[in-house]
Image (cartoon, rainbow, N blue to C red):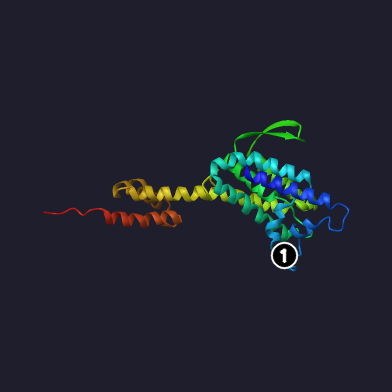
Amino acid sequence: MLVVALGAGAFGAQFITETLLSGQPTHEILRQWLALDDGVIKSGQWWKFLSFGLLHADPVQMAVNLLLLFLAGRELEPIVGARHFSIIYVVGNLLGGLAHWTFMSAKPLMGVSAGVSAVIVAYTTILPELEVTCHLLFVMPVRIRAKYLTWALLGVSSICWVTDTATEIGPAGMIAGAIFGWAYVKQLGYGNPLAIQRYIFDRRQRAARLARMTPEQFITAEIDPILEKIAQHGIKSLTRSERKILEQGRGKLSEKPVPKHS
């Protein structure tokens, strides 16, 4: 994947530069100019909201990020397409940067952990029941459903945020990226529908079904049970939805043709 190659190339350039400048006062010049820190606005260095993704705190962060990006990205991109994949990755990382700057700016942010989180959660949202093999401590293979990767990612990120651990990878940003990845593929129509989505869909289906009914069908299926309820418990026992049905019934009756008398 191109983004993986670009990430590896950027870290390679960073590693070579920092190695050549090792022991010199300018050793951390790349981090000073590209990492996202709390002085970005005061110093006018707005580019840091974009450039922090070019750096990584260390080889471990880089290797984990790019490996996860490759594994999840190669499954996600064929499903959503290259354009949507790029939006999930790039915007997820940018929002992660904003979240880190808002909540954890005391420590500089480097890397694409937020963008990788967005890709992982987008993938697990689309295929939540898919079984994937993870290696516990990079050794022991464990098969789990993809949806549990999201909860693991959110759990680890939350713990790091609360305990102020591994702040350079941006745990707050990872959570923001994860939320964006989830929301983006949901609006594309992937994943299991939310309760509110099911409610809206059911209401629309019911409204369409009632609209297709003839006046006779409507009276039999909808009005008669309500009239029976009124007879047994009084009109005050009706719910708002039942009162609306009665209003619809008046409209339906107006559609009924009046018989002509000779």
Is residue 62 left or right of 145 when viewed as pictured? right
Viewer-proximal residue, 33 or 124? 33
Which quadrant of the structure image shows residue 94? bottom right
Spot the residue most to the left: 262
* Visible residue check, residue 133: yes
> Which x, y percent locates residue 102?
71, 61
* Visible residue check, residue 222: no
**Secondary-structure class at tag 1:** loop
> Which x, y percent locates residue 37?
76, 60
Residue at 72% across, 68% down:
44
Q: From the viewer's perspective, is residue 208 above or below residue 147?
A: below
Residue at 46% across, 48% down:
201
**What residue did someone put label 1 on?**
45
Q: How many marks?
A: 1
> What is the quadrant of the N terminus in the image?
top right
> What is the quadrant of the C terminus in the image?
bottom left
Tell me the crowding category of disc 1: few under 14, some 14 to 19, or many 20 or more residues within 10 angstroms, Cα based: some
Viewer-proximal residue, 244 or 113? 113
Please name the amino acid that badge 1 sits on: Gln
Spot the residue most to the right: 23
> Which x, y percent locates residue 221?
36, 46
> Which x, y percent locates residue 217?
31, 46
